[in-house]
Amino acid sequence: MAVMFQATDVEEMLALMGQWGITELQLTVADASLSVVRAPAPTTESIPLPTCTANDIALLSDIDDDPVTITAPVVGVFHPAKRGFPAGSPQVGDQVQAGQLVGTIELMHVPTDLISPVSGLIEGILIDNGAGVEYGQSLIAIRPFEEVSEDEAGMLPPPAR
């Protein structure tokens, strides 16, 4: 039985590739094979700058570290975390702890957790809820809290006896 790809199938795959930003696809069904490579769509839109309150700016001005960017470990659809944030999802200026869930990327109903690698303040959310993401795409920028030594934190071990 020979399997053939119909024109409508190919058109639907091309539309999905454009919607998800996928640039390369290789599909094999039985004895039929299809390979499509598209040039990435030029991006002319700019990323909106995050809005900060005066309090956020004061908190951020004390920190000299560059922001840490959480990138997409897989292709899929981005969803921000629904718990652990005052507004119900991460917002610019919210505090996060290292190891805290900040969102997920869903592909075929299988979520991949996005975990904050540092403790700090969210400086920017670079993608909308429900938007398709590509591998390695920047999603969330976090400005790390300043590291303090054990002495500064008052965490000295008890004196030896």
Image (cartoon, grey):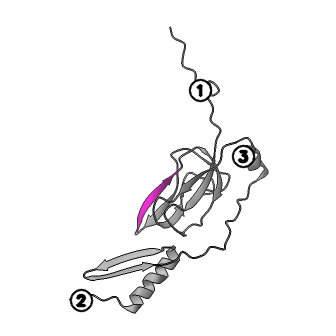
Please give left or right for residue 59 compared with residue 76 in the image.
right
Query: Horizontal and vertical percent for residue 37?
Result: 45, 77
Q: Amino acid at mark 2?
A: Ala
- The residue lying toward the viewer, choosing from 81 and 20, is 20
Residue 150 tag number: 1
Q: Earlier in the sequence, mark 1 or mark 2?
A: 2
Q: Is residue 139 visible?
A: yes
- Name the quarter where the N terminus is drawn: bottom left
- The residue lying toward the viewer, choosing from 149 and 41, is 41
Q: Residue at x 45, y 65 (%)?
A: 106
Q: What is the C-alpha distance between the residues marked 2 and 3? A: 63 Å
Residue topped by disc 2: 2
- The residue lying toward the viewer, choosing from 38 and 113, is 38
Q: Are discs 2 and 3 less than 8 Å apart at CB?
A: no
Instruction: Find out whether residue 114 is within the magenta segment.
Output: yes
Question: Which residue sits furthest bottom?
Answer: 7
Query: Horizontal and vertical percent for residue 15?
Result: 48, 83
- The residue lying toward the viewer, choosing from 10 and 87, is 10
Question: Which residue sits furthest top?
Answer: 161
Image: 123 above or below 64? below
Q: Amino acid at mark 3?
A: Leu
Q: Amino acid at mark 1?
A: Glu
Q: Residue at x 43, y 67 (%)?
A: 107
Query: Horizontal and vertical percent for residue 51?
Result: 73, 59
Instruction: Find out whether residue 156 is within the magenta segment.
Output: no
Q: Is residue 89 visible?
A: no
Q: Which residues are magenta?
A: 109-116
Residue 60 tag number: 3
Q: Earlier in the sequence, mark 2 or mark 3?
A: 2
Q: Residue at x 57, y 60 (%)?
A: 139
Q: Secondary structure at mark 3?
A: helix
